[in-house]
Every structure is written in C-alpha cells, then in structure tokens.
Image (cartoon, grey):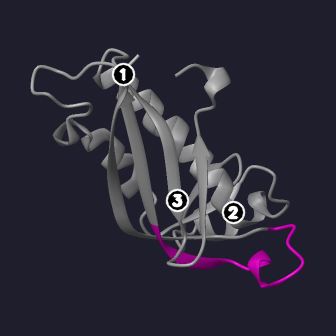
Amino acid sequence: MTKLICSKRYDNIPFAHRAPFHDGHCASIHGHNWSFVFQFAADAVDVNGFVMDFGKLRPLRERLESLDHALVLSTSDPELAYLQETLGKRNLARIVVIDDCSCEGIARWGFHTASQIVENLTDRRARVTRCEVHEDERNAAVFERSAAAGQ
C-alpha cells in the first residue's frame, strides 16, 4: 500500500509550564518558545492532490494559539488548585490543564488534539502520524502513531 506524507510546522508559541516532581530547576514555573511539527499521512490525496489541505487547519492553529502566553499545568500537579485559585482567578495567568505538561506529554496532547481535528476535516481520509514538539532549539519530544495502532 502506498502512503503519502506531508508535514506542517507551527513556530514560536510562547507558554510556561513546570515539572512539579522534578528535583531541579524545572520544578519552577518557566517558559519556552514552543514549536510543533505535525506529520500527516493518507493512502489517497484529495481532489486538489493534497494529503492535507493546510488552509483548512485553522482549528488546529487556534487550539495551539490558545496556549499563547498561558501557564500549562499537569492534572497531577500538587499545586494545581492553589495556582488556579491564586493566579487564574485573579487573572494573573491563563491556566490550561492537560494530563501531562512535560515536553513528552505536550507532544501526546498535540498528537491527540490534531488527530481529532484532521480526522473530522478529512472524513478520516488523512491521519496524524507524528507530533514533534520543541520546547527550544535543543530539546524536543515526539509522539507517533504506533504500527500496532493501525497505519
């Protein structure tokens, strides 16, 4: 079976996070200029010859932009309620809560977020196969669809 692949990159999305169980400086709230690279695959192209019509990815761009200048926290953060109360309710920070706000967890979140959007936009013709997240120019994580999950 032939598979066609393309990718789309979103750069410079500034937001903060923290690793609450880290034994070093990453336990503190800190920020990065994040980048996301999504890989799309399909067995057939659309009527325009595209695996993914990038112009139709506005819902994905909007989801990523919702992180802009936010504080992204993990559901397991022991200070989550305190931070929501002291920062969020006082409009000192816009807080976004995901399962895991590590770079790896953000890659997983990005993958699943993009997958739902792309599958809806293409009636399941195209799929997300990979999400690569860069927290800066040195550090990155990848979440990929495994072969066992179906390609």
Q: Is residue 67 visible?
A: yes
For mark 1, give the secondary structure.
loop
Q: Amino acid at mark 2?
A: Glu
Tell me the mark number nearer the camera, choosing from 2 and 1: 1
Q: Specify whether 145 is left or right of 123.
A: right
Mark found first going from the N terminus, 3 or 2: 2
The residue that appears at 52% across and 41% down in the rendered structure is 111
Q: Nearer the viewer, residue 72 or 132?
A: 132
- Mark 2 to mark 1 CA distance (whole Å): 52 Å
Q: Position of residue 103 (x, y in %)?
A: 64, 61
Q: Position of residue 8 (x, y in %)?
A: 32, 50
Q: Specify whether 121 is left or right of 40.
A: left
Q: Specify whether 148 is left or right of 70.
A: right
**Which residue bears the numbered disc 3?**
133
Magenta-tinted stretch:
20-34
The residue that appears at 71% across and 66% down in the rendered structure is 83
Tell me the mark number nearer the camera, choosing from 3 and 1: 1
Number of numbered tags placed on the structure image: 3
Vertical placement of residue 61 versus 95, above or below: above
Q: Amino acid at mark 3?
A: Val
For mark 3, give the secondary structure.
strand
The residue that appears at 9% across and 27% down in the rendered structure is 48
Q: Nearer the viewer, residue 120 or 88?
A: 120
Q: Amino acid at mark 1?
A: Thr
Q: Position of residue 39 (x, y in %)?
A: 41, 43
**Which residue bears the numbered disc 2?**
85
32 part of magenta stretch = yes
140 part of magenta stretch = no
For mark 2, give the secondary structure.
helix
Q: Quadrant of the N terminus?
A: top left
Mark found first going from the N terminus, 3 or 1: 1
**Which residue bears the numbered disc 1?**
2
